[in-house]
């Protein structure tokens, strides 16, 4: 049987899955890093959907997620989640990061998605330590998959070699402990 979680190195905007996850900011109005790459590659339809969400609920809180069209991307949806800014662990950043993965997966399930791809949320401009982020992302995903059979495949798309190394090491470790 194919592993349900896979770690790959690459660009998330190129991945063909039902939903890709964006590490957005709470304004939902786009930004740098993966957010900028997704809006650039997906075109204006994504921002148009984000504006509708902002008009309705005024953005997205840290640890929460919202869903939009994927515009011109090969995916069907973009799930925008807002990761925590790292404050040396003093503001429940670890709980909030886990929540990003869980809330995104819940939205994917409620929209009938079977395949989903995540970037390494918060490990760029938000400076969450990459080793800790790898541990939290993989444990949150594995935990969710245990209880939710409708998701067939979760890809963790690492843009940089450091995240890729931490994530592959962490997946091996957590699979061995199961
Ligand atoms: P955050 O503000 O949550 O830290 P960033 O976009 O700055 O968000 O970084 C999150 C992660 O996304 C970083 O590990 C960064 O290297 C990665 N990243 C940047 N561009 C892409 C891309 N096109 N595909 C996948 N990951 C990307």
Image (cartoon, grey):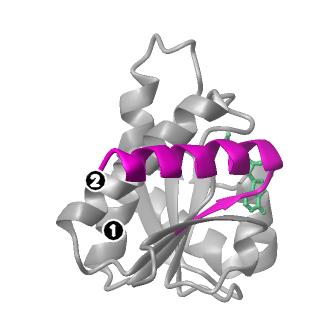
Residue picked out by circle 2: 143
Q: How many residues crowd around disc 2 within 10 Å: few (fewer than 14), some, or many (20 or more)?
A: few
**Based on the displayed image, in which of its 4 quarters is residue 40 positioned?**
bottom right
On the image, the x and y values in percent for residue 39 come to 73, 68
- Residue occupying the point 69% across, 28% down: 127
- Residue occupying the point 45% across, 39% down: 136
**Based on the displayed image, in which of its 4 quarters is residue 104 positioned?**
bottom left
Q: Give me the disc on residue 67.
A: none
Q: Mark 2 or mark 1: which comes first in sequence?
A: 1
Quarter that holds the N terminus: bottom left
**Position of residue 18 in the picture relative to residue 72 (left or right):** left
Where are the magenta residues, as a range? 155-178
Kindly indicate whether the residue at mark 1 contacts the one at mark 2 (C-beta within 8 angstroms): no
On the image, the x and y values in percent for residue 57 come to 37, 54
Task: Measure how far apart labels 2 and 1 are at the Cα level.
Answer: 16 Å
In-front residue for pair 110/67: 110
Q: Is residue 90 magenta?
A: no
Secondary structure of the magenta portion, mostly? helix
- Residue occupying the point 33% across, 68% down: 107
Above or below, 93 against 142 in this view is above
**Position of residue 27 in the picture relative to residue 159 (left or right):** left
Q: Is residue 177 magenta?
A: yes
Label 2: element kind: helix
Above or below, 147 against 13 in this view is above
- Residue occupying the point 77% across, 56% down: 159
Residue picked out by circle 1: 107
In-front residue for pair 40/99: 99
């Amino acid at each position: 049987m194919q592993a349900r979680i896979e770690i790959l190195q690459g660009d998330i905007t190129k991945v063909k899955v039902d939903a890709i996850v964006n590490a957005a900011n709470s304004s939902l109005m786009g930004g740098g890093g993966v957010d900028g790459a997704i809006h650039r590659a997906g075109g204006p339809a994504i921002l148009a959907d984000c504006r509708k969400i902002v008009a309705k609920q005024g953005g997205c809180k840290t640890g929460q997620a919202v869903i939009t069209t994927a515009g011109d991307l090969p995916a069907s949806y973009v799930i925008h989640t807002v990761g925590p800014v790292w404050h040396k662990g003093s503001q429940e950043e670890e709980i909030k990061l886990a929540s990003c993965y869980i809330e995104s997966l819940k939205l994917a399930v409620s929209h009938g998605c079977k395949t989903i791809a995540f970037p390494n949320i918060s490990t760029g401009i938000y400076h969450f330590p990459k080793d800790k982020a790898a541990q939290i992302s993989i444990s949150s995903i594995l935990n969710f998959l245990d209880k939710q059979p409708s998701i067939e495949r979760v890809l963790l798309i690492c843009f940089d070699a450091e995240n890729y190394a931490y994530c592959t090491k962490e997946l091996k470790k957590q699979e061995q402990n199961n």
